[in-house]
Amino acid sequence: MEGIQSAAQQMTSWLATGRVLFLLIHLLGVACFFYIVAMRLVPLIRGQRDFRFDQPFVRLGRVLKFWLGQWKHPRYRTAGTIHIFIFAGFIVLAMRAFSVLIVGVSQNFVMPGLSGRAGPIYDIITDYAATIVFLCMVIAVIRRLVFKPARYAVPARYGKAHTADAIFLLSLIAILMVADSLFAAAKAAAQSQPGQSVEVLAAFSLPWMLQKALVSTALPTLGMLYFGAYLVHELTFYFLLCYRPFGIQFHVETSLFNIYFAKLDREILKPVRWGVSDEHLDQVKSFGVKTFEDFTWKHMLDFYSCADCGRCSDNCPANAVGRPLSPRFITIKARDYNFQHYPVLGRVNNGTALVGSIYSEDEIWSCTTCGACEAECPLLVEYIDKIVDLRRGMVDDGNVPQSLQKPLKALESRGNPYGKMEKKKADWANAKEFQQICPVKTLGKNNGADALYFVDSITSYDDRMQAIGRATAKILNHVGENFGILGAAEKDSGHEVRRFGEETLFMALRDHNVDAIKASGVRRIVTADPHAYNALKHDYKDVPPVEHISQVIAREVKAGKIKFNPVENENSVYAYHDPCYLGRHNQIYDDPRDVLDAIPGLKRVEMTRSRDRSFCCGGGGLMLFYEPKEDERMGVKRVKMAAEAGANVMVTACPFCMVNIEDAIKVAGLEGKMTAIDLAELVDQQIARESQ
Amino acid sequence: MEILVCARRVPDTSENEIQLNSAGDDIERDELVYSINEADNYAVEEALQIVARVGGNVTVATVGGEDDEEILRREMAMGANHGVMISDEAFSGSDGRGIATILKAFVQKGHYDLILTGIQAEDGGAQVGGMLAALLDYPFASLVNSIEVLEGKKLKVSREIAGGNKEMNEIDLPCVLSIQTGINEPRYVGMKGIRQVASVPIPTFSASDLGLGANAVGEAAAKVKRVDYFVPALGKGAEILRGTREENINKVLELVAAKGGLK
């Protein structure tokens, strides 16, 4: 017994000689950390309001799912798995780190709850945790240096590669794990000197291996190792703690809060100013984000929380086609700017306008708001609201590309971006031949209906898309829906007007349409345009419930009201392209697929990028007028993906997708090999009508 | 620099389907939407950019009626300091010289260093700028597509010559310039901006305010009168080349060369 005590006591007494030093480092480390964090909070306090304090239980649930549960990580199998191990290791080791830190000052400290049998079990778990984290660091460094995943690369226009910093941080964590293990191993080795009882270390763990190596080392040397390991551990721990707020690893601290405060209703666009109602918006002098302080505090927290993993940009269609936009660098550039603008030491610098300095105009206009970045981000960083806010700022300053000014002006005077006459809005439905097979009534005082078919601008005025309108009307007619259209009284839904930052014009369009819809007395709204669907569902208030035509068709197919003739061409292979505002923004993935699968003999394949990883066709609404700088069209990439999947018919459910995909088929030289059809058109074509 | 921009409200050609009225003497105006004449909008933008560089004020004036106020508000939302309405029943039926006479009277009420007009009104004849300069006895430069402010009350302006060449001219202030579209990229005017200037008062000048007699302006004084308005008959349609790609390329080269487009 005495022998054991003497070895253990001796180790403890050696450690005790550093007590003052350790205490000093503790105090210094903690003080530095809190000072740095306080400085990092300064911009958040100066930022705009952002209401994120409601529904605490929902938010906690999301913390469990996305933070503790690491929900989005496995979307990238290798990196995600490694991260889950590191994250789990950190969670396990957090308590150990605390108790080790305290041991330096109070040598006999034992963490409450770990004094009994739980202690050795916890030790074994932490031994393995440290080993796994260490191995993960080695793997991560190898990935960075040898395999170099493309998404980590930094294009020259965004500055230097982040590899060195990443490896530096990974190494520090590895050192921390080794020091921690050595600390345990040295003590265990001392105790396992001949004649002493052996402390159990987890077999094949890092401490276990170190202990095996140290077993014959003399006691004084072990003491020095014990002391040294402690010192290295403590210094590394505090260095990391204080260094993390200067870079990507700050997410270790901020991720929990970032996920707790993440936006709950992603479909709803951020208001111009939180806490300012539409009626009082006229009193807001400046709209949108112009300087850094115009971001909300949560958006600033997003900047701190980004882990630079590059998943957003890896999925961003704008980035894929070489537009000057990479969501990852929207964040990284804002963070770097913030670090310079709010230095930890010294005074706050004078701010500059963000667009024109860290962001270019084209960068901000390049986004199609498809939402691929947000669907991917493991830390739930928000992008669309920031892009829209930056656009609001540019619109407020009159900084709008000439190509967009005309359609915006036309929307203001004519209610559609093409500048077409209001009285021609219902022309698509009024042709005599069409009225004979499918009468479509224009709703008015003496002409009511149960349902409104909200057509929106492109389907009303574009020659090609009018076919989608007619197919939709015929389907509604077939299922016996009592429906009508607003005709000249319908203005553009304003969906892209809002997303392009012209909030006041959007409000005018919305208010006009809401009045017209209410006056029509309908109880339901149907649309075949996902952008209109999204606007009516999320941007408008107090309008009847809205459905996309694919939902109506799916329901009527299930109810047996719609039956299909078999597909005639046996060589046709169909691929369904998820429109962003139907899929990602509204989670309508299955209805269109169920409809397709209900058509007898229809062969359907899935593209690799489908459902919430769908690849935007190029964007709708005003995006059709914007002239982006790009190497290739998004649509061209998309039709190639369909061809790769073995399809020769692309089915979509959005008129804007149709514009982009049909153009892209020509540009890609796939005419004759690939065709595009709208779901409504296909259904109309395949419906088994009684007369037939 | 005190800058006056003379602007006009016209039917927006991109947002209207222009048709003749039944009498055949004018276009059908019932369902038209109007906006500021495009070249005038470029002139206002140019004025704002000059003022941003050298200081001063921008005043936008229009000869018209109540309905024309919207373009003044739009240009004020764009950044113009003042909008002025020059309106009188006696003005109706004025020809180009009549409008220039009205504007001359207005210019002489104030102190403007520089007067800008658009190169031409979309429904007009590119007359007013030159006539206004002549009536004021000011120097005049037309088709201006860049302006540089020099020392000593001078400007350096350029205009495009047929064939794409540029000619640079120095011109003494005060002067009148007619502005070519493309001189700049006019800023966007959003609905918010227009709403914010919605209640700013716009002074109105009448014929008597400007000391103009009925015989100097209006229909009675007009010496140019519109006698007819018609839509020209459509000519032969475009020629569609229906050969192979190689044949079409050769044919296009041949056609372009025949018209002097290739040297």
Image (cartoon, coloured by chain):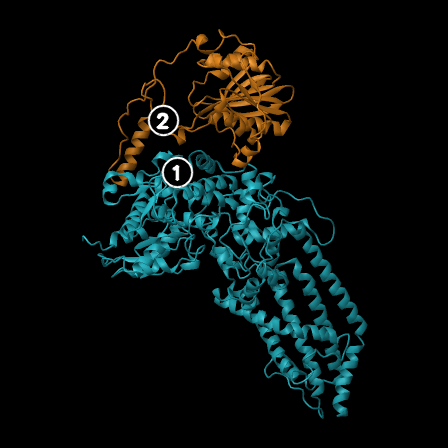
Chain colours: A cyan, B orange
Q: Residues within 10 Å of mark 2 (few under 14, many from 20)?
A: some
Q: Residue at x 68, y 61 (%)?
A: A243
Give the label, 1 or 2, closer to the camera. Answer: 1
Per the image, the residue denoted by label 1 is A489
Point out the image quarter for the N terminus of chain A. Answer: bottom right
A287 shown above or below A251: above
* Same chain assignment for discs 1 and 2: no
Tag 2: amino acid: Ile
Which one is nearer the viewer's eye here, A276 or B238? A276
Per the image, the residue denoted by label 2 is B18
Measure how far apart labels 1 and 2 are at the Cα level: 22 Å
Residue A33 figure quarter? bottom right
Is residue B221 in view from this perspective? yes
Q: Position of residue A589 (x, y in %)?
A: 39, 59
Label 1 secondary element: helix
Is residue A632 in view from this perspective? no
Tag 1: amino acid: Ala
